[in-house]
Amino acid sequence: MNRSSTASWPQWLIVAGWVVLALVCYPFASRVNDDLDASARLEGSESARVESALHTQFNSPYTKTALLRIAGAPPATTAAGRAVLEGTANVIRRTPGVQAVLSYLEREDTLFVGLDGSSIVIVGLSAPQGSADAVMATLRAATDAMRSQFAGRYPALQFQWTGEAAVNADLRRVSAAATRDAELRVLPITLVLLLVAFRSVISALLPVLCGALTIVISLGMVAAVNRFWPASVIVVSIISMVGLGLSIDYALLIVSRYRDGIAQGLPKGKAVAQAAEHGGRTVIVSGSAVAIGFAAMLLVRVSEVRSIGMGGLLVTTIAVLVASTLLPVLLDWLGPWIDMGQFGLGRKPGTGRNWRRWAAWVMRHPAAVLAAAGIPLLCLAVQGAHLRIDLPRGRWLPVSAESVRVLHDIDAVGRGNFGQIIHVILDLPPGVTVRDEAGWRAESRLVRFYARNPRVQHVWAITTLSSAPLGGPEILGRMPDAVRRSFVSADARGALIELLPRPGLTASDAAALVREIRAANPAVITGLAGARLAVGGVPGFNVDYEDAIRSAIVPIVVSVIGATLLVLSLAFRSVLIPVKAVVLNLVSVAAAFGAVAVVFQDGYGSRYFGLPHPMAGGFPIVPVLVFCIVFGLSMDYEVFFVARIADGRRAGLDDGEALADALAGTGRVITFAAAIMVIIFGGFVAGDFVLIKILGFALSVAVLLDASVIRLAVGPALIQLAGRWNWWPGRRTP
């Protein structure tokens, strides 16, 4: 075997390894949306403890529920409507995975009859999270058959499903469609920009190939991880956005380095080695900065935030590995074919003249450049101070999901807000049970206290289910066991109280009600010392979610900044360069926060992004996601730029020459990389998911400002002002 074939064997091994990995991951990646969770979980929270108690201490069949709206039939208060409701309820009860059915039949309460005469049915599910979609599909099929059965008598009859299980199933479907549509929107524009950048079809296709490979492998790995660590469906959009953007960024850098070497007259092998050495080192440092941001998300106890952190770490690692191992091999194999399909005037040695002119201007007027570029940036960043970390008001779930539209319909005609039911568990002190007069009286006082709250439409409790209003604990023996166990724990020391909020009460208002309930003194309200309350349900979870995010913000910011400073200090052997990079990144993040607050929260221009009204609030998760992702992505261009300066100084250039050479060498790459990144993130702004819309907008703004104002104006001006102190305490040539 000759030397050439021996040297080529590791290359074949590298390519074969990536191909095999992609083929193995593709089947899992293609159906990843079917398996991921559309809801968030918060282990160890008060709402999680309430949910667990409903399973273990009570016999509540309504811990997991779906809602059915029956429209187009006579009201359930009539004999004809009752017949439709009875037939439907009987079919639903026979469906596997259904525990119980609650409607006007069980409790002749007009709460279950809408203002338009429609019937509202609560269906308790026993199916685990992974099989809830299958149960909902079976329920939909069953009610479709019922519709056919009654179509002759009631042609306008409709069976409409919503609730947590139905919404989660629809969100998975909508998420998959939104991600696919976004990719279809951005790929053609991305390819055009790459063609303009390289003026070569092969050169333009390489970054796209790297991006596709990164996304497929990352999604396949997420599907595998999901089997033992459930992941959120939002991670698919994050991987698609970040994976494509990072892969193209890194490929642009390395391919540009390689073509620069060829343009300088280097042999193919040396050009590849130079690109792999200098570009690869930059990619690793940049990828480390991005990975730090995603790793920090693992500090948050919310499942979807940890899922994003896990997915971000995977996609960043794969993007770095593809760019540093596979891409150099492909460049070596392609050789002169890299310019196949070339059109127009190719790049010639000596290009970058305009960037050098700009560098000269910055070096002559650094203070003026800093003021002109920095002051408007700081003004936008200041707006980020009033970004709210709470639940948005109004309708923000994607209306393309049928279950979301049904939820809005129920809100419009319902006599209560069934989507915001609050679960309150009263824990009585030792020695006291609901069977005792003292325990019964304590719960009755608590129920009356809640019933007087103007935000509560109705209260369900064991003391409200009896037809004898003045009855005492003796009526427990006359109740059906299933009903009693739904509201009284096995040891009778716990009592479940369910609060149905009034119609129109928003999620943020319901969360405020939960905070008031938790802050109240149960001993004073019940008149029983030692009584304790635990509050759950969707509003309780929302409060725990918001609190978990708030408590994690400071540790995340400190850990990200500290780890980034350490990585950059080791990479550049400098104190000032890392500090400057972190400060500029913080400005970039603050500017992104400011843009989100102005557009989505205050409503200036929100209609151009598909929101007819301001949200007057935000998602608690937005600040964490924007900070962690923007901080890492913004570091990309800082590393690209500073690494090129360091390379120039190693080559013997003085500070000014190295700065001009870095701007000339990276200005074009950063400009096209940022333009592509903005297009990629912007493609997700057009989707129906408001959270993804806000995230795509924030990332687009951050990258745009970072690549234009910060990296090409503020950053070079600061480097010029710092002079030789940039590299202190290291040697003058790093």
Image (cartoon, rainbow, N blue to C red):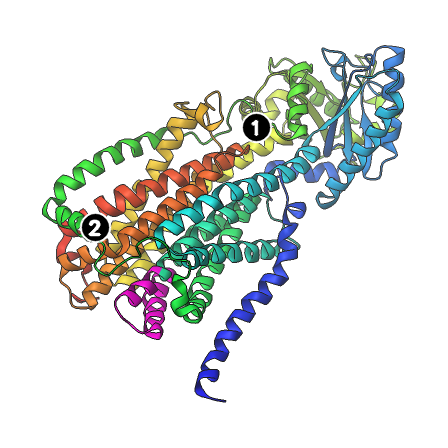
Label 2, on which residue? 355
Relative to 507, residue 125 above or below: below
Which residue of the protein is positioned furthest toward the bottom in this rendering? 1
Q: Which residues are magenta?
A: 256-284
The tag on residue 331 is none
- Give the number of marks: 2
Separation (CA) of disc 1 from disc 2? 61 Å
How packed mark 2 is, by other alpha carbons closer than 10 Å (few <14, some 14-19, many 20 or more), is: many
Which residue of the protein is positioned furthest toward the left in this rendering? 364
Q: Residue at x 70, y 35 (%)?
A: 165
Closer to us: mark 1 or mark 2? Answer: 2
| Residue 127 sits in quarter | top right
Compare residues 428 and 537 and report the one nearer the observer.
Answer: 537
Residue 637 as seen in the image, left or right of residue 129? left
Q: Residue at x 15, y 46 (%)?
A: 362
Q: Quadrant of the C terminus?
A: bottom left
Label 1, on which residue? 518
Q: Position of residue 83 (x, y in %)?
A: 90, 17
Q: Residue at x 68, y 29 (%)?
A: 403
Compare residues 716 and 54 and report the one nearer the observer.
Answer: 716
